[in-house]
Amino acid sequence: MEIKSRKARWSAIALSTGLVLTATGVATPAQAAEKKLTIGFVVHVIGNPFINQIIDGAKAAAKDLKITLKVTGPAGAEGDAQLTAVQNLAAAGVDGIATSVPSASMMKGLNAVIKAGTPIVQFNGFVDGVNAPYVGEKSVESGRLLGKMVLDKIGGASAKGDVIIGNCFPGFPVLENRSKGVQESLAKAPGIKIIGPSDVKVDAAANFAAWQGLLAANPKALAMVGLCAPDVESIGKVNAAVAGSKTIGAGYDLTTGNLAALQNGTAHISLGQTPFIQGYLPVYMLVDSIRNKIKINKAGFINAGTEIVTATSVIEPFGSAPLTFAKLQKMSASPSATRLYYDKIVKGYIKDWQKNLKPIADESA
């Protein structure tokens, strides 16, 4: 696909949108700068509740920054389809693109878009080698934390028995890193046997069926540990269907369904990865870099933070205000309440993104 240069695209936009021209027929730099920016936002799973929380963060940024946001993406984590969506946005003349990167096959195409003049910021999933900064969690460290919390629940270093691990998207680098961290912590108990990681699928119905089959095959499992957004809710439903189940349920993300499972006691631990920041910050970085001519065409990492949640405790990153479980539940269904809660982070950590940009290797340290 031929990708237009930034100069060519801006000229085309100027003509098509009717920017005021000088007597010579060319828009001045000042006039061009007044053009309302358009940012593309490409996700890897349209319709997923967790991804919707990220999109809500991006929409909040678009509203605050007075820019147009174009959200798109495939139905189910298809790298080639997602790359096509990025390329189509670039060809249409958007000013910048934020995208998750679930597949190494996207790297060459993304770098071609960047080289042609469209800046990119990665979020939620990245590939080392893409010439763009990344906003996400410290994935291995997050896995270590989850594994330690699970181990504490099942008896610590003296625990003996099976622990099931599920991965909804095997090969996704961030998820593989989480798995590595979980197993690193569980290895402190020599009596633990790891079952998996098994492919538990990303579709909600298929995810539930996968966990149901895993527990049926391993009914005495001490814990079920998921690495993806649908898992905690599914694990909770599986536990609820087994009379007297004492299997610990743990995983990721703070969707309404996951929080309900924690509240009713069918699941026990869920780590959030601050989806508001993963949506808001990439858009902010793109707009700030475009408006202030800051080059962002190289790898780097900004930590979106880890939220630690049980039914009785909520710990938020970056010195955020104390948050009760009940208030977190309300926020999970309210983009406006979430935006209000993170106002301090927007005015501090997000605004100071250049100071917080670290080497990409920090992501998996």
Image: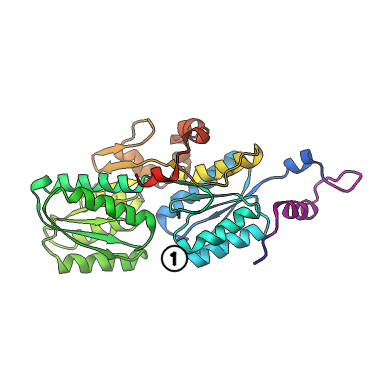
Residue 125, horizontal then vertical, whole percent = 43, 53
- Three-letter code for the amino acid on which mark 1 is drawn: Gly
Seen in the image, is 251 located left or right of residue 163?
right
- Which stretch is magenta? 4-26
Query: Is any part of residue 329 visible from this angle?
Result: yes
Residue lying farthest to the right in this orientation: 23
Secondary structure under tag 1 reads loop
Let me know if residue 298 is in the magenta part: no
Q: Is residue 346 above or below residue 300?
A: above
Which residue does the image show at 41% across and 55% down from the upper left? 49
Which residue does the image show at 85% across and 46% down from the upper left? 21
Seen in the image, is 264 located left or right of residue 295?
left
Q: Is residue 105 above or below residue 188?
A: below
**Can you identify the residue that label 1 sits on?**
76
- The quadrant of the picture occupied by the C terminus is top left
Quadrant housing residue 235: bottom left
Which residue does the image show at 46% across and 66% down from the upper left? 78
Q: How many labels sit on residues? A: 1
Which residue does the image show at 52% across and 35% down from the upper left? 354
- Please state which of residues 34 and 341 is positioned toward the viewer in this rendering: 34
Residue 258, horizontal then vertical, whole percent = 31, 52
Residue 162, horizontal then vertical, whole percent = 13, 59
